[in-house]
Amino acid sequence: MNIIGIKELQTNPGKLSQTFSKNDYLLITKSGKPIGLALPFSSGFLENGMKPWMALKAFEMGDLSLGQLAKTLEKTKVETMEMLARLNIPIADYDLQEDLDAIDTLLA
């Protein structure tokens, strides 16, 4: 693993391709704190790591349904919900106050 500051990466972008040609990865920092990770593209990485991560992020952002996520991860919906619970990713995303306000409106 190589570490590079964001300013150095801006002035020396060739370091990125050099790192990738060695099949290594690059930890990118800003003021000494990690802000990103640059990885070489490989099908093994995509299938074993990036694909599930991207699917989980898409679910968190509301771009994938629970069913779509389960299918992408090749899991049942129950297995997917258990995994989401372990990762502290909420299955439903809603605004409680909005629901309470709607109930108050209905009862008024």
Image (cartoon, rainbow, N blue to C red):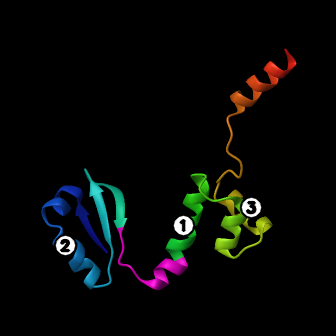
Secondary element at tag 1: helix
Q: Separation of disc 3 and disc 1 at Cα?
A: 15 Å
Percent position of residue 15, x then y: 19, 72
With respect to residue 13, does 85 lie above or below?
A: above
Q: Name the residue under label 2.
A: 15
Membership of 93 in magenta stretch? no
Q: Name the residue under label 1.
A: 53
Query: Dots 2 and 1: beta carbons under 8 Å?
Result: no
With respect to residue 62, does 102 lie above or below?
A: above
Residue 81 tag number: 3
The residue at 74%/61% (across/down) is: 81
The residue at 69%/40% (across/down) is: 94
With respect to residue 88, does 46 lie above or below?
A: below
Percent position of residue 79, x then y: 76, 68
The magenta stretch is 38-48
With respect to residue 27, does 7 lie above or below?
A: above
**In the displayed structure image, the side of residue 41 where residue 45 appears, left or right:** right
Counting residues from the start of the chain, the first of labels 2 and 3 encountered is 2
